[in-house]
Amino acid sequence: MFAARLIVAFIALFAVSSISVAYAGDEAPWQFTAFEKKLGAGLTKFPVDQALQDKIDAAVDKGTNWLLTQQKPDGHFDIYMNTHVMGGTALCLLALVHSGVIEREDRRIQKGIEWLYQQYLDLKAHDLLRTYDIGVTLMLLEVRPVQFNPRRTEAQQQRTPLELDWIKEMVAWIEEKRNSSGFWSYPHGQGDHSNSQYALLGLSSAARMTVDVSTPEFYIPVLNHFLDTQDQSGPAVPPFGPTVDMRSTDSNFANARGWNYQEGWLKTGSMTTAGVVTLAVIHDRLTELDGRRRRFYDLQLQGRTTKSIFDGLGWLGKYFSVERNPAAPSGDGGWHYYYLYGLERAGALTGQEWFGQHDWYKEGAQYLVDHQLDDGKWDTNAAGNLPAHIQAVQDQEDHPFAVNQWTDTCYAILFLKKATKPVPNLAPPPVTQGH
C-alpha cells in the first residue's frame, strides 16, 4: 500500500516538472528551453563535411522514428526483458533524449521514466536490481527533460525531492555492490569491466546531479584495479594524427595496452574503451574531490592514470576498426555496436579526434549511415560480421544478453549524436623517447 502511494506521489511530482505554467514578471522564473541546446548534444568537435552530416542527421531521424514505434503504451520497450528489465528501456529512452526528439515527444520520455520507477520499486523489493540497469538509469535521469530555472546552475535544475531520493538510493546501491577487489558484477557472479564501466558512468551522472559518493577514497580501489588489469606492456605508438607514420617510434607517445572483460579473456576494443572511460571518469571525480588536498590522488598516481588512459587510446589506434570489435592479437570480439558506442565515449571523454591515423568519428559515422536498414533500425546481422559463437547467442531470442535491433539502434544513435560530455583537464602525458 505504501509503495502504491509512493508511485502515485512520484508520478505527480514528475508531472509538476513537465507542465508549463504561466507566470508573470519576477514571479515567473520557470521556462522551457530547447533541451538539446541545454544538453549540448552534438558536440562541434569531431566535425565532418556537410554531405556526411546531412546523412547523419537523416539517419538519426529515421532511427529515432523507428525506435518510437517500438515503445509500448505504458512507456517501456521489450528489450532485455529476462534480466535487464530496467536497463533496456532506460537505454532506449537515453537514445531518444539525445536524438533531439524531446521537444515533440516529452510525454513519451516522461511515461518511460515513470515505468522505470515502478520497476525499480518492484526489483528492489525482490533484491533483483542490476548494475547495468542502475547505471543507465542514472545516465538517463541526468539528461531527462526538466524545466530550466535561470537562477540556478545546470546541476541544480528542478528535481523533485522524491527524484533526488531515488538518485541517492541508486548511488548507495552502486557503492554497496562494489566488490572487495574494486569492481562490479551483475551483481551475481565474478566481476567484470563492462558492469564496472556502467557503474562508474552512473556515478558520474549522479555527481553532475549533485549526488556524489560518500568519500573520494571510494574510487581508489577501482582505480588500482583498472591500472593493474591493463596490459603491463605493449608496442610503442607515436602521437595520433593523419600524417603520423605509425611505424615510427622516434617520438613515443604511448604504448598500446588494452583491457579484457575478465582475467583470461582476449583484449578487445569494447573492453579497452571501457578501461579508458572508467579511468577518465575516476580521474575527473578525484581531480574535483581530492585535487587540492591530494590525500588520495597525488601527482604520481595522477601521472600513472593519465599514462594508462593514453596507452589505452594507443591500443585503440593500433587495432582500430569500425567494421568489427577488434580483438588482440587478432580476431573479432563480437558485441559490435556496443563497441562503437564505447569508441564514442572514449573519444569524447578524452577529447581525441584521432586514434592512430583514424578519424574515429568520421569513419564510424560513415559506417553507420551505410549500414542502416530501410525501416530505420540498425541490426548487427545486417552487417554480416558476427562471429559464430556470438551469432549462436543472437539466434536464442530469449537469451537475456542477445544482441538485438533495439540495442544496436540505440548505440548507433548515441554514437552519431556524440552523446558523451568530455572530461575537462585531461592532458596527455609528456612525449618521451623510447619506452
Image (cartoon, rainbow, N blue to C red):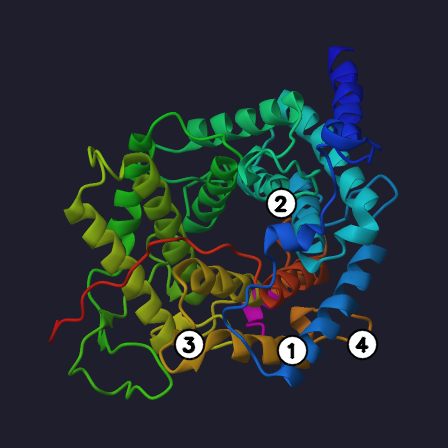
**Extreme residue in the top direction:** 1
Tell me which amino acid carries mark 1.
Gln
**Extreme residue in the right direction:** 73
Compare residues 349 and 304 and report the one nearer the observer.
Answer: 349
Pointer 4: what residue? Answer: 374
Q: Is residue 250 above or below residue 149?
A: below
Residue 235 percent coordinates (x, y)? 22, 74
Compare residues 326 and 117 and report the one nearer the observer.
Answer: 117
| Mark 3, secondary structure of its residue | loop
Pointer 3: what residue? Answer: 320
Whether residue 346 is in magenta: the answer is no
Asked whether residue 80 is in view, the answer is no
Tell me which amino acid carries mark 2.
Val
| Mark 1, secondary structure of its residue | helix
Pointer 2: what residue? Answer: 143
Q: Quadrant of residue 22?
A: top right
Q: Which-is-in-front pick, marks 4 and 2?
A: 2
CA–CA distance in space, label 2 to label 3: 30 Å
- Give the side of residue 124 with respect to residue 188, left or right: right
- Residue in the image at 74% along x and 39% along y: 31
Question: First in sequence: mark 1 or mark 2?
Answer: 1
Compare residues 390 and 108 and report the one nearer the observer.
Answer: 108
Residue 214 percent coordinates (x, y)? 39, 25
